[in-house]
Image (cartoon, rainbow, N blue to C red):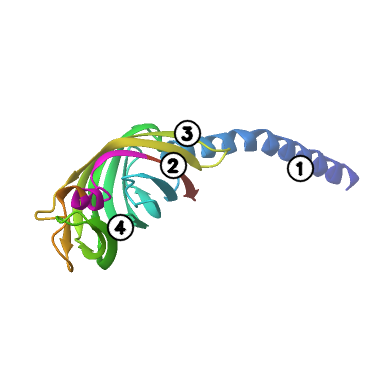
Amino acid sequence: MKHIVSTLSVALLALNVSAQDVQPEQQKKREKVRLDRGPAMYITTSTGINNNTGVVGFNFELPVSPHVTIDGGPGTGTWNHKLYIGAKYYLRPAQRGFAFGTGITHATGTRGNSYWATTVYGDRRLIRFNKNPQTNAFFAAYKYWSLGKQYNRFYAQLGWSLPLSAGDKITQLSGPATTQDSKNSIASAAPGGPILAVGVSFGVH
């Protein structure tokens, strides 16, 4: 009986040692698969000039393949609330390195805002304007860097925002006619032109 117990003890010890040797290899394989595929979703916050979600906002990014994601989200900026939807193509798997993206943004504008403007008579007055809604298409290049050992990332974005909306960007609601320079100054805050943005995204497993 003692001989049987001793034999079983030695066998169990050998299996335990063998399992410990195999476990790190299995863990490495699992980690490699996760790194190749990336997380299930990213939650991102960002800021910048003509940023997809305005001066400050957040978005959700969903990988649909190792190289392709779709994303979208809300924010706020110089033209009130802003929404966007887009897609990216990554040159490396697991959503790292360089990526190229495109999409559509929509800024809601505002109604009845007052601004100091110069009239055609040469005086300055507080005059009410509407900022009309603006829809834009954007094209951008991204560079992503890993933050820590998880799926968190820091990124920089460069690109161009192309206005799609027809008509005037602003509408005067009160007072005498204003100069074109005053109108241009107010309208200059509308979405459109070069994109320069940075952000941080957090991977959700």
| Magenta stretch bounds | 182-196
Q: Amino acid at mark 1?
A: Leu
Of badges 3 and 1, nearer the viewer stands: 3
Task: Categorize mark 3 by other alpha carbons within 10 Å: few (<14), some (14-19), many (20+).
Answer: some
User: What residue appears at the point 21 percent right and 51 percent down from the top-left corner?
Assistant: 182
| Mark identifier at residue 12 | 1
Of badges 2 and 1, nearer the viewer stands: 2
Task: Categorize mark 4 by other alpha carbons within 10 Å: few (<14), some (14-19), many (20+).
Answer: many
Q: Are marks 2 and 1 in contact (CB under 8 Å)?
A: no
Q: Is residue 40 above or below residue 35?
A: below
Image location (x, y in percent) of residue 42:
43, 49
Q: Amino acid at mark 4?
A: Lys
Task: Give the camera-side residue of 101 and 122.
Answer: 122
Instruction: Give the labeled residue for mark 2.
Output: 38
CA gap, disc 2 to disc 1? 38 Å
CA gap, disc 2 to disc 4? 28 Å
| Mark identifier at residue 82 | 4
Q: Are marks 2 and 3 in contact (CB under 8 Å)?
A: no
Instruction: Give the labeled residue for mark 3.
Output: 145
Specify the quadrant of the image occupied by residue 135: bottom left
Q: Amino acid at mark 2?
A: Gly
CA gap, disc 2 to disc 3? 14 Å
| Mark identifier at residue 122 | none
Residue 35 sits inside the magenta stretch: no
Q: Earlier in the sequence, mark 4 or mark 1?
A: 1
